[in-house]
Image (cartoon, rainbow, N blue to C red):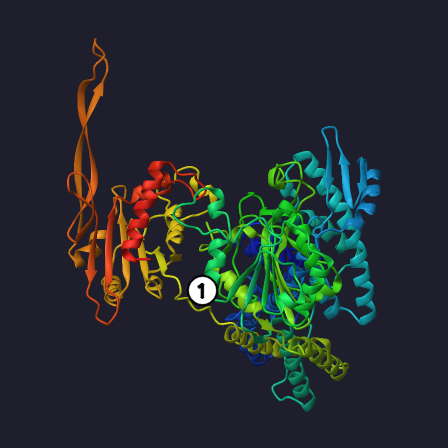
Amino acid sequence: MKRFLWLGILFLSASWLFLISQFTIPDLIAGLLCVITGTLCIIGGISRNTKKQPQIRYVVLLIPLIASLLFVPFPYNLGLIVLTLGLLASLLCYRFERLQAVPLGISLAGILLLLQTMVFPLYVSFVSHGHRLDILSLVISPLANFLGFHTSTNNGLLFVQTIQQTSAVTITWEKLGFFLTLNLFLGALFLFVILFKRRQILKNTMIFLVAGALYLLLRFIAILALYLTTTELSVFWDPLLTTLSFLPFCLLLMKILPLPVIGDLAIQAPALHLTKKDLVALILIILLVSSLTGAFLYQDPGSKKTGRILIDEYHSQWEDTLRPLDTEWYGLLSTYNYYSWAHWLKDHYPVETNINETFSADLLSSYDILILKCPTESYTTQEVQSIKDFVQHGGGLYLIGDHTNVFGMNTFLNQVSEEFGIRFRTDATYELGTGDLSTYTPDLYFSHPVMRHVPRFEFMTSCTLEPTSLSAYLRMENIIIGDRLISEPGTYSTENFFRESIASPDSEYGYLLQSAAITYGSGRVVAFTDSTVFSSFCLFTDGYSSFTLGVMDYLNRTNSSPSLNMILFVLSLVFFICVALLLRTTNKLQILWMFLFAGLLAFYLAAPLCSHLTNLAYPPPMTSTESPQVYFEQQHSSANISVKPTASLGDNTNNYGTFYVWTQRVGLVPSLASTLHDATKNSNLIVIINPAQPFSETDIQLLTSYLETGGHLLLMDSITNPQSTANELLGNFGIWITTSTADQVLLSNESENGSLIPRGNITFPYLIITGGTQLLINDKNEVYACSVEIQNITPGEQGRLIVVVDSSTFSDAQMGGTFVEPTNRQRQLYNTEFFLLNTILPP
């Protein structure tokens, strides 16, 4: 029975490999099976002679447990769920002596999972700031050679020679299996504490650490051998293989560290009739957990500044902000630039551009935020010092780099960023296992202020960041730590420095730092790693504009002094010392239950409070009224809108990315609205393309009210949209879309004199419009576009409804991608779009 405990710890620890998206997409079924199996093993390691416990005391702990369950998202509340089930089971099994092992085992499993959850954020931050363990190559290489391999080391890399090739291999925490080992250690340490006395706890801990370190080295060599045989990089992170690879370690622990069968633990909840000592201890634990939670989760609101922004063009020849995105200039560089980004920022902040001056204290003293984007020239020592002094005295610094040190921009940025403890690396990131572009979804409650109002962020290939020192690591604020990522080193042998392979053994994977912030003096620094996403062709999609405003709001503040986070951390240390002194003679299991009760209660109170304070300090950005807003409604539209360069490949007949971006050429700011209700907020124009979802009475009333208060609606439909619901809406305004047909004669040149001979004809359908005022007609006087003026119920501009067929004319299949050099026909299509938009919203 006692061997079941180690198996229980293993399966509970391994469940996180399946439940979180560190390496793979979460597998809920496999993860829960591990939890169930681990819990059963823990139950199997408990004596059947365990005495029953007073049920009323467990009810007290259910209060903070259930409260915390409502706040902590799944799967991170798994320990809370299991512990709650254990306490509920204790109530059900109260009268059954032989069943007492069941609730006790479930409760212990819940505590183990809860302990692992508490350490998990520290693990994520730790590994994302530094993956490699180069020093271990000096240990692994001779050990591998002893076992029959042919290896050598250079600059921390392990080179493994086989008949086919020589492979460079990095030694990282992830390749060693550190995450599962850490969870095993936490589970083992917990059982050591509750089962053994102090001296035995220390002895067992040392044995576990030594045995674990040796096993990790041998396991790495074994997995490396498997990789060399299969050439599948996934052998390093596959959850099932990782779990199985630790079974021998579990069997070893059964031999060298046998755990006794858990008998009557006499686990006691806090007494209902608290002594003065108990009450003081509970209060101190609540203060301890509250202050520690605040130290990590509280976000300094600082003091707001004027928001004067300076964008540096003097050191940058990439992502230009100067040449306008207009209706005449086309091609790659017309949209692969920062003009729209800079122009749009001017709607929110005072923005100027530096094109001919080196940085000095006098120049920077006139601004609150300095943006260094994609530098292609180095900074002088004097300029770096001026920037450093600017931040020291309260300035905000925004550093934008990109993948693989393209154009040397990360090298030049590091001249500045390393002064603050941040280094841009020369790598490129992709989604692990697929090589696709990666997506980041912020946490609802615990996200950084920059990401507070960003629902989703899609990268277009970033580099990664790392701290330059321990001090920088401790001060660094994680804005984006991407998961399920692989980092490939750059190379100078290919265009844009991308490697041809994205699955090499010298890669790093798992959690990677893609954006970070750090405070310095009274100022703040934000580093970001994917310059492409702010280009004109994609700025107003996938969270990029919201992220930009989040960065500006964060940088446009000076830091509070002294730091409340540091004060709270010091207080937590004081409270911890007080608790340790007060409870030094108390039963350790009694201490456990007191920490569970008071700690969970404190976390439930402190964490939501910190989240609420952050929301108050960093509210959602206001929609600017400087430039007209056009919302592309997605609730009823069946059209796809993707602006990624890959969207123009393959079947793009229903993609309208170019039409979307081209609205910027006439001064509009486009956005995607997931619902009709969202689209009617603050928008000057709503665009619905190929409606296929029914319009309810509420939808029709909402749009009618929107038009009657000066709003504008552009509805586009296509003959290729057989599920069209356009007439459900348009009939309310006296407009109908109908189908017409046209005949076309088929000819062949098979006659003796070579003339064309009629062979028949074909008939094809197309859409026309009836009603409204004509805007565009064909040679048969059939209407392709019309408008209806809507009487405004309030003083101001009249609303307008414009209907257009056939929308497929404006798809990417006809208009081309956003980088295209247009043909004459495509230019005519562009001009038609511009005519329609200018008709609705005159410049």
Expressed as whole percent of the image width and height from the top left, the position of residue 778 reads: 19, 40
Picture residue at 65% right of the left edge, 75% below the top: 565
Q: Along the line of sight, which residue is nearer the eye, 335 or 738?
A: 335
Expressed as whole percent of the image width and height from the top left, the position of residue 511 reads: 62, 54
Q: Is residue 764 above or below residue 713?
A: above
Q: Along the line of sight, which residue is nearer the eye, 169 or 140?
A: 169
Q: Is residue 41 left or right of residue 69?
A: right
Q: Is residue 693 left or right of residue 598?
A: left
Q: Residue furthest top?
A: 752
Q: Residue furthest front?
A: 356
Residue 232 appears in which quarter of the rendering? Answer: top right
Q: Is residue 34 above or below residue 710?
A: above
Q: Quadrant of the N terminus?
A: bottom right
Q: Is residue 540 above or below residue 490?
A: below
Expressed as whole percent of the image width and height from the top left, the position of residue 22 reads: 60, 53
Does residue 190 appear in the picture of this structure?
yes
Q: Residues within 10 Å of mark 1 (few under 14, many from 20)?
A: some
Does residue 520 appear in the picture of this structure?
no
Q: Is residue 351 left or right of residue 266?
A: left
Picture residue at 56% right of the left edge, 72% below the top: 87
Picture residue at 69% right of the left edge, 58% below the top: 416
Q: Along the line of sight, which residue is nearer the eye, 360 or 748?
A: 360
**Amino acid, disc 1:** Asp
**Residue at which label 1 appears:** 347
Expressed as whole percent of the image width and height from the top left, the position of residue 207 reads: 81, 59
Q: Quadrant of the C terminus?
A: bottom left
